[in-house]
Amino acid sequence: MSATVGTGWEVVIGLEVHAQLLTRSKMFCGCPAAFGAAPNSRTCPVCQGMPGVLPVVNRRAIELAIRTALAFDCRVNEACRFARKHYYYPDMPKNFQISQYEEPLAEEGVLEIDAEGASRPIGIQRLHLEEDVGKLVHEGTLETARASLVDYNRSGVPLMETVSKPDLRSPEEAAAYLKSFRAVLVYLGVCDGNMEEGSLRCDANVSLRPRGATELGTKVEIKNLNSFRNVQHALEFEVTRQRRALEAGERVAQETRLWDADRALTRSMRSKEFAHDYRYFPEPDLVPLTIARAWVEEIRAGLPELPRRRRQRFVAQHGLPPYDAEVLTQSRALADYFEAAVREFPQPKTVSNWVMSELLRVLPADDERAIQGAPITPARLGGLLALIEDGTISGKIAKDVFEKMFRTGDDARAIVAREGLTQVADEGALAAIVDQVMARNPKAIEDYKKGKTAAAKALVGQVMKATGGKANPGIVNRLLEEKLSKT
Amino acid sequence: MTGLTIHELGAAYRRGETTPTQVVAAYLARIERLDARVGAYLTVTREAALRAAAAADARHRAGTPLGPLDGVPLAVKDVLCTRGVRTTCGSKILERFVPPYDATAVERLAAAGAVLLGKTNMDEFAMGSSTEHSAFRPTKNPWDLARVPGGSSGGSAAAVAGDLAAGAFGTDTGGSVRQPAAFCGVVGLKPTYGRVSRYGLVAFASSLDQIGPLGQDVRDAALLLGAVAGHDPRDATSVDAPVPDYAAALDGGVRGLRVGVPREYFIEGMDPEVGRAVREAVETLRGLGATVEDVSLPTTDYGIAVYYVIAPAEASSNLARYDGVKYGLRVGGAKDLIEMSSRTRAAGFGAEVKRRIMLGTYALSAGYHDAYYGRAQKVRTLVRRDFARAFERVDLLVGPTTPNVAFRLGEKEDPLAMYLNDVFTVPTSLAGLPAVSVRCGFSAAGLPIGLQLIGRAFDEPTILRAAHAYERATSWLARRPSLA
Amino acid sequence: MISRDDVVQVARLARLELSEAELERMRRQLDGILAYIDQLKALDVAGVEPTSHAVPLTNVMREDEAAPCWPQEEMLANAPDRAGELFRVPRIIED
Ligand SMILES: [Zn+2]
């Protein structure tokens, strides 16, 4: 399974994840931060880096970053400041990026990941804020293009960079880290987690060292890992590439490589282009921030329960099997849905079964918006389950009702009434049907008497068929048992 | 009709003796007649000025002027962005740049009813002390057309001195308002850092730049400052503190004020005429009732060295955006982006700007960052401490604005010799303090000499009050350059 | 002393094309200025806090409110070269 198994090498991976924050406006100006609009239609002199403009910090971006830092148990630095990071690239209008360097917003945190069935803490080195760059469109590919085109709409969108410690030991762990990371961010409501649209982007540092060694090997940076699959595939490719090189006695060059998803390989970026000297210095246009403890505590008090803790609580408080708890906490919307339904119908395992088997059959677990807008609200699911509980409908009928509820958005009671699906629980009427069925099936009665208990099931089926599935199975069973024992 | 001070103009408008349109037209005519010789303007906004004047006429007729600047013709340095009016910063690289927005100061002047006559010449990107580093043409000193007006706000100072505008604005990073004010014999004020919004001021060195007024007398400077000072949410370094009525604070004299005279501001190699005039000015203040004491600012000598690390470092960053991609000049025919940007910058920037970009890039680069930029920032702290100590004992400091009077065009070819001209103005900029330069005499050759008054942070009222008392006690303002 | 190679490297970082003559002149001038700046080394700055802002302000922030954007055409008007709604630049990879 892992690219490292059976080798004498240990894989060392650290991830840098960039997440666009869910603010209304950009990091340093009032332009909307939302994705998607005609090119260069969401800019202003500030985010286009015109002469004379000045940045002003978006308070909400700081707040969202602190929120994230607290979720990772980071130390939120009391003094933090912005710095200019210099390099030339046409998607960056000022040819410097306002970022953080010596005094980042937060440091020293931890993210628990699940690796091979066990939980493992991965260190977080630092978390800081910066501004996103614009988008380049190449006329052809980057290599062959005669010209490139620039759209500055994305320029200045708040970007939170989180750097892990080199604690990850396999491509699978790296993918698991990214998954947990994304889940936490989405849970916190700080990022929409959409990797296709680039709301969440990932770079990796990979090196190999002989097992048991304490010094790190030569580190290669891999860029452009924009999906979970890419992270794992790119790292597997890179680990194999480095292992082969090392085993052939070659040296691994310290460089930046780009993951080419189409060709499924990493390739070296021209080193000249990335030989940077960033010349950081404190951003003179922005004053330092002093993060008040009271503000941090206020943000901490507003933190939602994180996936990991919620999963544990679902087991402890609702008595769910760990498997159920894990499925139900895949997204905040789903976990909220489950708990809301349990408030309506306080039988957690029953609710869990219905959510997992029925709701997730029609809606993806991690589609927050779809689950929040599900036509079957938690209250309606509770109502449906109550109808089963009080014997109005059978579980089998309930599944049909569920589908109709999903299609029409009606509540269960209305559908049951409209379609006459109420269970037949009238003993007199059912007794008459049972008698008719028994009269038509003497063979089954003979078999039953010979000890073939399965014959009774066939008779129940006949009764259900005769009632169009509406007979109360409990009553039918009891009546049949009584009558069979009397014959 | 030209040559009245702003407060005199205001009175004339109120009494109906003249109208903004008449005055603006007179200034435009004078510019047309004389500016070819002075070179104060890069752009004259004739049509817009006449339109704004007509609107001011109507307000004055209705008896509802917007304030003391309503209908007053002003010039602003071409480093302040003006919506729809090209803003060149004296550079080829921005020769055709037309900002889609107004600087906050420009916006506030318009809101006060001021009439913009045009944009004034300057050393490219405000880097220089003579206005010879303009990419377009040098500006001449109205007192002697063979001499420089100082810089970098030389166009604004020459416009005021030559009666080509009633008042003007410049920017001061290391002395760029005060030094040309001294050379041209006008009043030039650098406000406390954070007092005037920098939004729309094309940055040279962000931690030092301030917009400042140039006026014919102290009262004009106070009126001009009052129109642009105050908090701006678009500038995070602008301070949210109330703006005093600077003009109302002018009276009251200097009796009881403690005036400090920094020992280090009288140096060897300084023009003796300047030293003498400044010492006489100190005696005048003493005669008016101020107490005078010697103070020491021991790090004065290091100011230039600190400044020539920090300002170029910030400049190298601020000027990185001029790469031929989004606006301004682009040199064609390059085979790739790097070549295009490198050639555009080579063709678009002048020698002084290139020198400072190189110096700043070097001072920030790996291996040199701590030795230059890091150390300069620490010495900057020492400079600030010097002033803080001095202001424990005195209310203001008084000394020369520059060591010399205006020099001849082409006289200072060595960059370092030019830099040393800022020795008395740079420390105040490093400390972010307010300072004003006023005329305090003339050299034997008839060139004005500048007296610098330095105040505590946000204490512009005190230095203006002292400058005003000095101005009223002397008659230096009676003399005017003759251009005609 | 600043070397010619240093000047070449700094010019590359600063994206400035310098002719041979300019390179040498620049080297000489920078050398003179740096020698002057080197007097800072005489000062003892141990334990001195650096100053990066002249005015001691902290925590200046704005509320997260989206303002209307600027007209697209105004933001593109100064472009030296464009393709419709986009800024256009020569090929990015060096030949
Ligand atoms: Zn914007």
Image: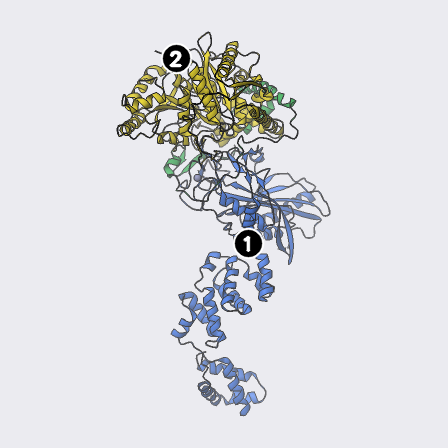
Chain colours: A blue, B yellow, C green
Q: Is mark 2 within 8 Å of ligand 1?
A: no
Residue B344 appearing in the image: no
Three-letter amino acid code at disc 2?
Ala
Q: Residue furthest top?
A: B444
Identify which residue is drawn at 39% across, 42% down. C68
Three-letter amino acid code at disc 1?
Ala
- Toward which corner of the image does residue B41 lie, by quadrant? top left
> Disc 1 marks which residue?
A183
Above or below: residue B12 compared with residue A110: above
Q: Residue furthest bottom?
A: A487
> Disc 2 marks which residue?
B478
Q: Chain of mark 1?
A: A
Quadrant containing ligand 1 = top left
Q: Nearer the viewer, residue A345 or A463?
A: A345
Above or below: residue B277 compared with residue A110: above
Select label 2 or label 1 by which is in front: 2
Q: Chain of mark 2?
A: B
Structural crowding at the residue carrying mark 1, measured as other residues with C-alpha within 10 Å and reported as few (<14), some (14–19) or many (≥20): many
Q: Find numbered disc 2 in the image and state the secondary structure of the residue it sits on.
A: helix
| Circles 2 and 1 in contact, beta carbons < 8 Å | no
- In the rendered image, residue B481, in percent from the top left (x then y), is placed at 39, 12
- In the rendered image, residue B38, in percent from the top left (x then y), is placed at 39, 15
